[in-house]
Amino acid sequence: MNKKGFTLIEILAVLVIMSVLAVAGYAGVGAIKKNINNKEYDAKVKTLESAAIDYGESNYSQVVSKGSTGLYVSIKDLYLAGYINADNENINKQCGSKPDNEKIECILADPRDESKHMCGVTVKVVNNRVTATYETSC
Protein backbone atom coordinates (compact mmCIF):
# COMPACT_ATOMS: atom_id res chain seq x y z
CA MET A 1 0.00 0.00 0.00
CA ASN A 2 1.36 3.45 -0.99
CA LYS A 3 0.88 5.99 1.84
CA LYS A 4 1.07 9.69 1.22
CA GLY A 5 1.26 12.03 4.23
CA PHE A 6 2.59 12.02 7.76
CA THR A 7 1.53 10.12 10.83
CA LEU A 8 0.26 11.89 13.92
CA ILE A 9 3.50 11.03 15.78
CA GLU A 10 5.63 12.66 13.08
CA ILE A 11 3.56 15.84 13.13
CA LEU A 12 3.72 16.02 16.94
CA ALA A 13 7.50 15.51 16.87
CA VAL A 14 7.91 18.42 14.44
CA LEU A 15 5.69 20.63 16.62
CA VAL A 16 7.73 19.79 19.74
CA ILE A 17 10.99 20.62 17.96
CA MET A 18 9.56 23.91 16.65
CA SER A 19 8.33 24.81 20.15
CA VAL A 20 11.77 24.19 21.67
CA LEU A 21 13.40 26.36 18.99
CA ALA A 22 10.83 29.13 19.51
CA VAL A 23 11.41 29.20 23.28
CA ALA A 24 15.19 29.28 22.81
CA GLY A 25 14.87 32.10 20.26
CA TYR A 26 12.57 34.12 22.52
CA ALA A 27 15.02 33.87 25.43
CA GLY A 28 17.85 35.04 23.16
CA VAL A 29 15.85 38.02 21.91
CA GLY A 30 15.07 39.04 25.51
CA ALA A 31 18.78 39.09 26.39
CA ILE A 32 19.60 41.10 23.28
CA LYS A 33 16.83 43.62 24.06
CA LYS A 34 18.09 44.03 27.64
CA ASN A 35 21.63 44.63 26.37
CA ILE A 36 20.40 47.24 23.87
CA ASN A 37 18.37 49.02 26.57
CA ASN A 38 21.42 49.13 28.88
CA LYS A 39 23.55 50.61 26.11
CA GLU A 40 20.85 53.15 25.23
CA TYR A 41 20.61 54.29 28.87
CA ASP A 42 24.40 54.57 29.13
CA ALA A 43 24.46 56.70 25.97
CA LYS A 44 21.75 59.00 27.34
CA VAL A 45 23.67 59.46 30.59
CA LYS A 46 26.95 60.15 28.74
CA THR A 47 25.19 62.77 26.60
CA LEU A 48 23.84 64.52 29.71
CA GLU A 49 27.24 64.34 31.41
CA SER A 50 28.91 65.79 28.32
CA ALA A 51 26.40 68.65 28.22
CA ALA A 52 26.99 69.25 31.93
CA ILE A 53 30.77 69.40 31.38
CA ASP A 54 30.20 72.04 28.70
CA TYR A 55 27.93 73.89 31.14
CA GLY A 56 30.58 73.61 33.86
CA GLU A 57 33.31 74.95 31.59
CA SER A 58 31.13 77.94 30.72
CA ASN A 59 30.36 78.52 34.41
CA TYR A 60 33.77 77.52 35.76
CA SER A 61 33.91 80.02 38.64
CA GLN A 62 30.49 78.94 39.88
CA VAL A 63 31.58 75.26 39.83
CA VAL A 64 34.84 76.04 41.64
CA SER A 65 32.96 78.00 44.33
CA LYS A 66 30.97 74.85 45.22
CA GLY A 67 34.18 73.04 46.15
CA SER A 68 34.22 69.29 46.67
CA THR A 69 30.42 69.00 46.81
CA GLY A 70 30.11 70.19 43.24
CA LEU A 71 27.40 72.11 41.45
CA TYR A 72 24.11 70.27 40.88
CA VAL A 73 22.71 70.94 37.41
CA SER A 74 19.24 69.64 36.60
CA ILE A 75 18.13 68.44 33.18
CA LYS A 76 15.88 71.51 33.10
CA ASP A 77 18.89 73.79 33.75
CA LEU A 78 20.78 72.17 30.87
CA TYR A 79 17.78 72.64 28.60
CA LEU A 80 17.14 76.27 29.56
CA ALA A 81 20.85 77.11 29.12
CA GLY A 82 20.78 75.60 25.62
CA TYR A 83 23.12 72.66 26.24
CA ILE A 84 20.49 70.07 25.32
CA ASN A 85 17.30 70.37 23.32
CA ALA A 86 13.86 68.80 23.43
CA ASP A 87 14.44 67.09 20.09
CA ASN A 88 17.18 65.09 21.76
CA GLU A 89 15.77 61.65 22.58
CA ASN A 90 17.44 61.88 25.99
CA ILE A 91 14.63 64.12 27.12
CA ASN A 92 10.90 63.87 26.85
CA LYS A 93 9.21 66.03 24.25
CA GLN A 94 7.45 68.11 26.95
CA CYS A 95 10.75 69.66 28.02
CA GLY A 96 10.35 73.25 26.99
CA SER A 97 7.36 72.71 24.74
CA LYS A 98 4.91 74.23 27.21
CA PRO A 99 3.96 77.93 27.30
CA ASP A 100 5.96 80.23 29.61
CA ASN A 101 3.26 80.26 32.26
CA GLU A 102 3.43 76.48 32.79
CA LYS A 103 6.00 74.41 34.57
CA ILE A 104 8.68 72.90 32.36
CA GLU A 105 9.26 69.24 33.12
CA CYS A 106 12.42 67.66 31.81
CA ILE A 107 12.47 63.92 32.28
CA LEU A 108 15.04 61.31 31.31
CA ALA A 109 13.23 58.17 30.15
CA ASP A 110 15.01 55.01 31.29
CA PRO A 111 14.58 52.35 28.58
CA ARG A 112 15.65 49.58 30.97
CA ASP A 113 12.51 49.68 33.08
CA GLU A 114 10.31 52.38 31.49
CA SER A 115 10.83 54.62 34.54
CA LYS A 116 11.23 58.36 34.30
CA HIS A 117 13.85 60.41 36.14
CA MET A 118 14.03 64.12 36.85
CA CYS A 119 17.57 63.83 38.19
CA GLY A 120 20.48 65.98 37.22
CA VAL A 121 24.24 65.99 37.04
CA THR A 122 26.81 67.00 39.64
CA VAL A 123 29.60 69.05 38.10
CA LYS A 124 32.96 69.31 39.88
CA VAL A 125 36.46 70.53 39.18
CA VAL A 126 39.01 67.76 39.75
CA ASN A 127 42.69 68.43 38.99
CA ASN A 128 41.70 71.60 37.12
CA ARG A 129 39.33 69.65 34.85
CA VAL A 130 35.57 69.82 34.84
CA THR A 131 33.94 66.44 35.50
CA ALA A 132 30.30 65.43 35.64
CA THR A 133 28.47 62.54 37.28
CA TYR A 134 24.81 61.73 36.62
CA GLU A 135 22.84 61.40 39.85
CA THR A 136 20.96 58.10 39.80
CA SER A 137 18.83 59.04 42.79
CA CYS A 138 17.13 62.38 43.12
Image: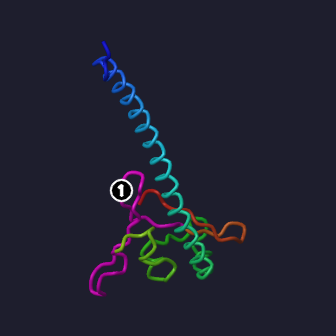
Residue 129 image-quadrant placement: bottom right
Q: What stretch is highlighted in magenta?
A: 94-122
User: How dense is the environment of label 1, judged by Cα within 10 Å: few (below 14), some, or many (20 and up)?
Assistant: few
Residue 121 at x, y percent in the picture: 51, 67
Q: Is residue 113 found left or right of 60 in the rendered image? A: left
Residue 90 image-quadrant placement: bottom left
Which residue sits furthest right?
A: 127
Q: Tag 1: residue type?
A: Ser
Name the residue carrying label 1.
Answer: 115
Q: Residue at x 72, y 67 (%)?
A: 127
Q: How many labels does the image show?
A: 1
Q: Is residue 29 found left or right of 50 in the rendered image? A: left
Q: Is residue 75 magenta?
A: no
Residue 124 at x, y percent in the picture: 60, 68
Q: Quadrant of the C terminus?
A: bottom left
Q: Is residue 121 magenta?
A: yes
Determine whether 10 is above or below 135 in the image: above
Q: Which residue is drawn at 34% across and 20% down?
A: 10
Front position in the image: 110 or 33: 33
